[in-house]
Amino acid sequence: MPDQQPVDNPTESGRPSLWRRVRPFLRRDRSARLASAALAFVVIVGLSWLGVSALTRVDNDAAHSLRVHLGLETPGAVCGGGGTQPACAYDDVEQARAEAQHAQERRVRIAVLQQLRVRLDTQLALLDAASTRTRRMAAGSRDDLLQPVDLRPAVTREFNRASRSRIRRALGRGDDRQLARAIAHRRRLIRDASSVVDRLLARDNAGPVSPIPASGVGSSARVDLLAHVEDRRAATRLHLWLTAEAGEPTGTVLDELTPSDAAALATAISDPDAPLWHSGFSNPAARSQAIRVPSVRYRSPIDDQTHWRLVGVAVWGFASLLLLVAGPVTTAAQTANERQAGTLPVLRMTGLSTRDLAWAMAIGPNLFTWAAGGALLVVGSAILAITVGWAALGLPLVLLALAMATTYPLAIGFGDALGTRLSPLVVGGLLAGGLAAGGLVGGLLVSLDAAGLGFFLGPLPAVLGAIAPVTGIEGFTWAPSGPYAPTSTWALLYGLFLQFAMAVACLRLWSRRVERPWEPLLSPVEGVSLALASLGASLIVLFDIAARSEASSLAQLNGATFVASALLLPTLGWLFAVSLRRPARANAVADHVATRWAFARFQAVLAVAATTLTLAYGALMQSIDLSPRGAEVMWGTLAQTLLLAETAVGLLLCAARRRRGKLRVALFGGLLVLLQAIAVVVVYELETTSALHWGTEGSLAALSEATSPYWLVFLALLWGTGLAVVMTALLRKRDRQRAEAKERERSVDPDDDGMPGRRLIH
């Protein structure tokens, strides 16, 4: 016997492994695609880091407001919290200006208060000396008691003059007892003012007050201060205060002031309620409150752990987009390209099974996507494992694996179904739009726990909803653990079941249509099964919306029913339109027999759906204690919705029976369905308004004595046209059959012996 060559890595059946069978599809431009994947990985990680850094590290007003709005930062974490907390400054120049103004005000306050303290001490010394002379009944001049001293802003000029006038009257009368009382009264006034000044000095952390030297301050310094006061009246008041109204100069406590402080000094002296004093003279409670800079330079309080957690979530999210959007789109486009080129049967002849071809369509064109997405997934998971732990990644990773297992078969079926009708670029664009739009809308609905409907909008919402709570953004929560956990959990599980069922149906479609592209997309059994499964999804959506909206009126309940019906009816029509059986040849159209059977199946499932929705609607009415009276508007609207569904299915079946002119049917049918939908909404609004304002009972299609005949004609045309479309889709095309029979009869030659183009000559 000849020696048998060993097979490299053989399987038990002698066939090469799956990797060796699929590897030829990975060799094309492998180096270039891997290099592109590495570059994309670096760019995406860098952009994620830059984007998160802009969110967490930028110190401007917009970034601060965004962080507060997202819940990453509390409103008063640094500044701007109101009350005694300083305002936020987002510019270094602005903050430097605020600090300079604060320093100037403090310098002026301390200078004025220290000067007042010296003057008050001088007045107390004079009063003590005068009191001693009064007790000893000593004679002599007491004019020193009448020396004018300006004690503003601690003591107003009027009060100060009144106190001196009281002493002057006592001196004029020569009444020592009255003079003693006047001196005691002025002493109390001076001591109270001294106490206020001491507390204000302590509030500004001022040092001890030095006595006034005999030299005083020169007149040139006073002239410099006065020259920088624009208001002449304020300058006059400042001049009087500086000279203490007695022509004597002030002390050196004002020497530190500069000409730029002159305006603030004039305001501080003349107005005790000026903002510079911060209510120190008028509000006793304000004297113990420290004066701080009115604003602080805002710096982001986001720590490094939060920063890297957001970076990990961003990288993980990009990995999900690559694996669940970019990869399936590439697979669908490649499948459509192979179907359009007619190379699938040729690939089948190489010995590859349908399963091998499915793996080839999923892995072969996605080397870039899987390499870049896998690297991003590893890096994002590693960052999140360090920051939040592996426990938080368990559920997102499981959902991502399940989504990948169902999305790629769906992409293969989608590309195979549309590959003979549309270009691969259009097929990829349609799938990308559906996955991205459904993922974005559904992800927001799931992450914000707004509606369980998001779980039915594709494979991406569940993954995004599971990873969103890791961000720590306020409002993001995992819906099955929120306040509406029962309906959300059912929506999640049922959504995964529907995706799995669709994936199995697409794999069966692929196995049938690889070599027989005329096979229907779905078998009748698969169409009915998926239709019943869609009915279950519609019921879950109905109960979920009713529970979340806390429906307490017919209007809210009707809105939930509308949403559930809008989700269900188009799905039913499409499922039965794609399950039509066609003759075993390419570009064949369905005949009237297959169309009638499909329409009959649709009527059966539609009856089940209508009955189920009716029972659910009645159960919800009973659960919220609503009276059946007034619900006739909704029953009539649901009846019209069923008629609209009949029209839509009739249009789909009519298009399936045509080889040409499908675009005309689509345009005409779309316009007809749109007008019917508008009519349904208008009728519902009219009937609801009538029942609300006039208390009348509703009627089907807004029929009453006041109904306009034009409205009746419009409704008759709409529903009559829909019935005509249904009849056109179901009737035989007898005229075409007669024409085809006559054409066959004319093509038959009685002298032909079976050899066309030749005659026997006898």
Image (cartoon, rainbow, N blue to C red):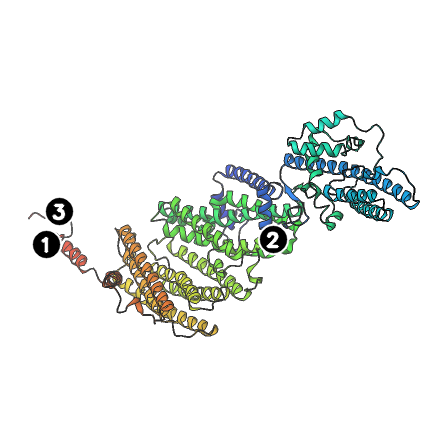
Cα separation, mark 2 vs mark 3, equals: 83 Å
Amino acid beneath label 2? Val
Q: Residue furthest right?
A: 136
Of callouts 1 and 3, the N-terminal one: 1
Residue drawn at x 42%, y 70% is: 617
Amino acid tagged 3 = Arg
**1 or 3: mark nearer the eye:** 1
Q: Nearer the viewer, residue 46 or 256?
A: 256
Point out the tag, 1 or 2, that comes first from the N-terminus: 2
Against 644, is 127 above or below? Answer: above
Where is residue 741 drawn, in percent x and y?
A: 16, 57
Local packing at callout 1 (Cα closer than 10 Å; few below 14, some 14-19, many 20+) is: few
The residue where tag 2 is placed is: 470
| Quadrant in the picture for residue 101 | top right
Q: Quadrant of residue 687?
A: bottom left
Examine the rendered structure and indicate whether residue 204 appears above or below residue 680. Answer: above
Q: Secondary structure at mark 1?
A: loop
- The residue that label 3 is drawn on is 758
Query: From the viewer's perspective, is 109 left or right of 376?
Result: right
Residue type marked 1: Pro
SS under mark 2: helix
Between residue 435 and residue 630, name the one nearer to us: 630
The Cα–Cα distance between marks 1 and 3, rounded to whole angstroms, is 13 Å
Tell me the residue that label 1 is attached to. Answer: 750
Q: Where is residue 29 shown, x and y percent of the image?
A: 48, 38
